[in-house]
Amino acid sequence: MTWTMKRCFVTLAILCLWRVQQLAEACSCSPRHPQQVFCNSDVVIRAKVVGKQEVDVGNDVYGDSIKRLKYDIKQIKMFKGPSNTIDAFYTARSSAMCGVSLETDGRKEYLITGMLEADGTMHVTLCGLFEPWDNLTTTQKMGLTERYQMGCECRITSCSSIPCMINSPSECLWLDWLMEKTENGRQAKHYACIKRSDNSCAWYRGSAAPKKDFMDIEDP
């Protein structure tokens, strides 16, 4: 083997290792109904983003500084979270590390979900919700004020291929990916999984508050 060929093999090996590292670092989020994101989040707010800066938040185990993006926000309404007003949240610097990117001119309102860290700061990732407020359906907006919370004890089971089944009456079968090949389909946009008086759960869509014994997929 010539020296030139050896150099080529070494270069290819380095490129392959770099690509493997890139894939390992890529952000991956499983499909989740908006209600699931709401129930699993510490904070759910409606806000405008008014600023962004890169900040140092400490050091890793090797002593290297850890940098994140800090988004300054103007909170409009809190649907779930602490008693204090949230004026900023933190996220990773790139989407590969699950960081989010939002417009910072203060014109657009967003629905933003996140988790609270030990120091009380809010952390946001690509696996949460950070949707422009005007993109939400009427049902989704109603879900934020009451409906989703009514179903947090229910379990939403995603179905991506047939056969689909549920294991208990407290589950709602989510078919958007199977039927529409998207996680932002009809059930995500227009339905909430709500607990009934007999402790079973069912999909509900309606402008009025659900009755205690509503039928599955009721749409009055």
Image (tube, rainbow, N blue to C red):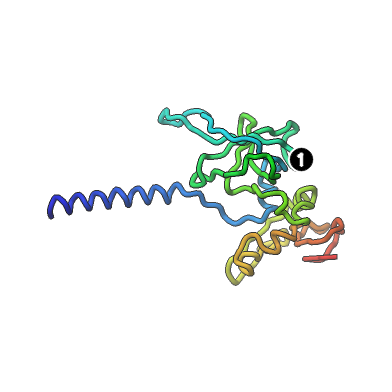
Q: Nearer the viewer, residue 173 or 3?
A: 3
Coordinates of residue 206 in the picture (x, y in percent): 82, 61
Q: Which quadrant would residue 198 be assigned to in this image? A: bottom right
Against 32, residue 88 (above or below) is above
Q: Is residue 154 left or right of residue 220?
A: left
Coordinates of residue 135 in the picture (x, y in percent): 70, 54
Against 130, residue 193 (above or below) is below
Label 1 crowd (10 A; few <14 / some 14-19 / many >=20): few
Mark 1 highlights which residue?
A: 77
Q: Residue at x 42, y 51 (%)?
A: 23
Q: Residue at x 67, y 63 (%)?
A: 185
Coordinates of residue 47 in the picture (x, y in percent): 71, 40
Q: Nearer the viewer, residue 13 or 209?
A: 13
Q: Is residue 190 left or right of residue 208?
A: left
Q: Nearer the viewer, residue 209 or 180?
A: 180
The local secondary structure at tag 1 comes to: strand
Q: Which quadrant would residue 201 be assigned to in this image? A: bottom right
Against 116, residue 210 (above or below) is below
